[in-house]
Image (cartoon, rainbow, N blue to C red):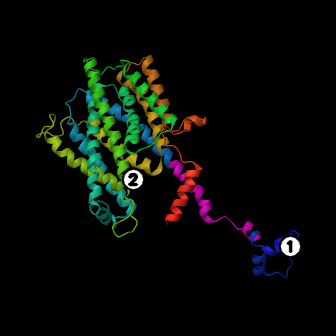
């Protein structure tokens, strides 16, 4: 039909040209009339599906981030008997471990589950042991977050805890040798100023104790410790992944472990580290270990486990922009809900600090971009070699080889 169509449109081709000769002389005419390959038509569907997944993750992560300080504040300041915080942390890690095993089985298949665990966890025992460091830090972080909500209002905790972005940025420069653009340093400075304004605003709610400045300082100590543990653990994990061997001992390319394998490793170490801490915790009762575990505390355990799984999903389907946007919305949402729930009283300094923290988070995550080239230049970067030096270096390498 290609030859006939070409003749009908007044082409120079005649009927004596066979289809095979036509393919040799005018191949581009055939290509223009071919249908698009199937993988090109499926690409749009895949992009739309990935977009829907990102929106779902954004909604769930925002609600989860906003509900964590609210549930912690309510559970820590209720009239019931205080629960054992290390036991709660271990329970949420057990939930995360079980969920990660099921998700890994759905990813690799039930038949390959044991072989995957044998290869990626037991077989690479050196890499598994290195994960004990971030697991210990995450355990300390979760305990400090619980204790911080005992002394700080939920909104103050949520805004102050965003300072972990500041910690991650500094540790990335010191430990990973990262070089940050000027707009990121602007976001870090704005974040520090906003957190400072929030903490000097003297905001309180009906659940606040009468300890005054001492209670505030104790709460700030716990939340800063939690932010430092979170930042150091994330940077350490990133450095560990980047410095891992890319090839096996036999010379073949090493397979990148699944995110659910990492979750299994971290949860296992956290459980092993938490069990001896539970035994010596002052709030632990060996005769009634689940004392104080009301429905809110049980829901808090499941909610925190969901947060750990959502972080893995963000790494797989999202990016830092999605995470930063979720943090900004959750900060506003937690502040608004705290007003009717706990009688939270805000002021001018708190409002300005919240706006500055949200703006800084969006600047650091590239949601707000500067068009001027000056803001996008990396600070403290080593000078680039001149074209003459580059050519000399290339010539030297060529002669040496």
First of labels 1, 2 by sequence position: 1
Residue that badge 1 annotates = 7
Looking at the magenta stretch, what is its main secondary structure? helix
- The nearer-to-camera label among 1 and 2 is 2
Res. 242 mark: 2
Mark 2 neighbour class, 10 Å CA radius: few under 14, some 14 to 19, many 20 or more: few
Res. 177 mark: none
Tell me residue 125's x, y (percent).
Answer: 26, 59
Q: Secondary structure at mark 1?
A: helix
Q: Secondary structure at mark 2?
A: helix
Q: Is residue 159 above or below residue 398?
A: above
* Residue in the picture at 40% in, 29% down: 159
Q: Is residue 31 magenta?
A: yes
Q: In screen coordinates, is 124 left or right of 392?
A: left
Q: Is residue 34 magenta?
A: yes
Measure how far apart labels 1 and 2 are at the Cα level: 61 Å
First to last magenta residue range: 29-52
Mark 1 neighbour class, 10 Å CA radius: few under 14, some 14 to 19, many 20 or more: some
Q: Return the residue nearer the eye: 309 or 220.
A: 220
* Residue in the picture at 39% in, 39% down: 168
Tell me residue 30's x, y (percent).
Answer: 74, 71
Q: Return the residue nearer the eye: 133 or 10.
A: 133
Q: Return the residue nearer the eye: 73 or 244.
A: 244
Tell me residue 210's x, y (percent).
Answer: 25, 17
């Amino acid at each position: 039909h290609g030859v006939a169509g070409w003749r009908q449109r007044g082409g120079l081709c005649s009927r004596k040209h066979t289809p095979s000769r036509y393919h040799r002389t005018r191949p581009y005419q055939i290509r223009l009339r071919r249908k698009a390959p199937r993988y090109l038509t499926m690409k749009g569907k895949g992009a739309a599906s990935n977009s829907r997944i990102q929106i779902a993750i954004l909604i769930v992560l925002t609600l989860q981030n906003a509900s964590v300080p609210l549930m912690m504040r309510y559970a820590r300041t209720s009239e019931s008997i205080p629960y054992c915080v290390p036991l709660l942390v271990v329970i949420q890690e057990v939930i995360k471990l079980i969920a990660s095993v099921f998700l890994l089985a759905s990813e690799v298949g039930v038949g390959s589950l044991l072989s995957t665990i044998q290869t990626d966890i037991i077989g690479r025992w050196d890499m598994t042991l290195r994960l004990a460091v971030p697991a210990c830090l995450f355990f300390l972080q979760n305990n400090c977050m619980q204790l911080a909500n005992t002394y700080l209002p939920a909104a103050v905790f949520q805004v102050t805890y965003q300072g972990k972005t500041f910690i991650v940025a500094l540790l990335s420069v010191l430990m990973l040798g990262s070089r940050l653009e000027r707009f990121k340093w602007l976001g870090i400075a704005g974040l520090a100023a906003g957190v400072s304004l929030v903490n000097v605003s003297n905001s309180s709610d009906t659940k606040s104790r009468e300890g005054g400045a001492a209670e505030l300082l104790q709460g700030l100590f716990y939340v800063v410790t939690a932010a430092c543990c979170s930042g150091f653990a994330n940077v350490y994990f990133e450095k560990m992944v980047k410095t891992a061997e890319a090839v096996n001992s036999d010379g073949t390319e090493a397979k990148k472990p699944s995110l659910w394998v990492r979750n299994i490793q971290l949860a296992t170490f956290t459980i092993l580290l938490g069990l001896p801490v539970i035994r010596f915790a002052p709030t632990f009762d060996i005769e009634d270990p689940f004392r104080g575990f009301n429905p809110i505390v049980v829901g808090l355990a499941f909610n925190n486990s969901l947060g750990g799984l959502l972080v893995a999903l963000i790494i797989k389907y999202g990016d830092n922009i999605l995470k930063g946007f979720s943090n900004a919305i959750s900060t506003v949402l937690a502040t608004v809900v705290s007003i009717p729930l706990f009688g939270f009283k805000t002021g001018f300094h708190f409002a300005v600090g919240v706006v500055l923290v949200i703006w800084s988070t969006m600047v650091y995550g590239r949601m707000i971009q500067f068009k001027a080239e000056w803001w996008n230049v990396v600070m403290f970067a080593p000078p680039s070699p001149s074209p003459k030096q580059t050519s000399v270096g290339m010539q030297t390498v060529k002669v040496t080889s």
